[in-house]
Amino acid sequence: MLVSCSRQGVERLPSEEDLGKQLGVSRMVIRDVMGELESRGYVTRKRGVGTRINTHIFMAQPRVDEQLDYLELIRATGREPECKYLSDAWILTPEEPVLDETFRTEPGERLLRLERCFYGGGIPLIYSRVYIKESIFRLDYSKWNGYQDLSIFEFLETFCVKQVHITLAELNIVPADTSLAQQLEVSQGTPLLLMRDTGYTVEGEAIVRANAYLRSDILPVKLVRHRI
């Protein structure tokens, strides 16, 4: 509804009561939804003025602060997304900085490394390595057909006893080394956006670490910041 209103040039929404009647839901439901939309920057509510649609925020796509998977992120640019599964392996020592005071393993505990590349219109746009703690697995994923096609969240739900409740992302710019340059088909030294995600359970335990390298020359992403 909001997208349709934004495209039609509508600047303000009806009152919560009127919206509830139009959509056949309670005013409390409308209030909760509006609160969520406001927290994501899509609307601004002001007493005595009403609810204003922030069209410029709708136009700011794709957004790195939205909980989109990489296929959705690429699709938001108008390109047809594709994921290519590269490899999986149990490792003790990652080839890149992964373990720190936040994401730690027990002595001798292995990490499962999943390696994938995401394409848009046939062009490699995102190269990703995901590391999952061995201690949270309940099933041997390698005995299941089709595990390569699962998203990370689907993979965790299927094979692990703990799930990600919230993700904290760190952003940085890094030059493409030889391996990254080959995977993303860029020149060595090309600046890439590194999005380093840590997935936490509802209890606050870090169980997943992911490093994703994005080609920002083709896949520009935006971040909506709020004044607190």
Image: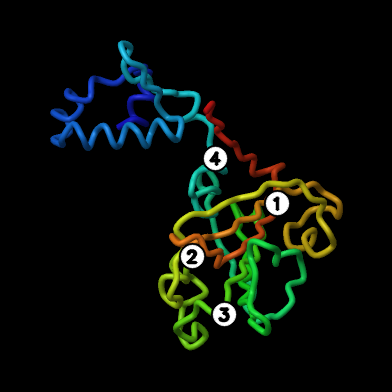
The Cα–Cα distance between marks 2 and 4, rounded to whole angstroms, is 19 Å
| 2 or 3: tag closer to the N-terminus | 3
Q: Secondary structure at mark 1?
A: strand
The residue pinned by badge 4 equals 63
The Cα–Cα distance between marks 3 and 4, rounded to whole angstroms, is 31 Å
- Which residue is more in the foreground, 140 or 200? 200
The residue pinned by badge 3 equals 134
- Which residue is more in the foreground, 127 or 20? 20
Examine the image and state in which quarter residue 223 appears. top right
Q: Are marks 2 and 3 in contact (CB under 8 Å)?
A: no
Amino acid under disc 4: Arg
Q: Are marks 2 and 4 in contact (CB under 8 Å)?
A: no
Amino acid under disc 2: Ser
Single out the mark in the foreground, 2 or 3.
3
| 4 or 1: tag closer to the N-terminus | 4
Image quarter hosting the N terminus: top left
Q: Which mark is residue 194?
A: 1
Amino acid under disc 1: Leu
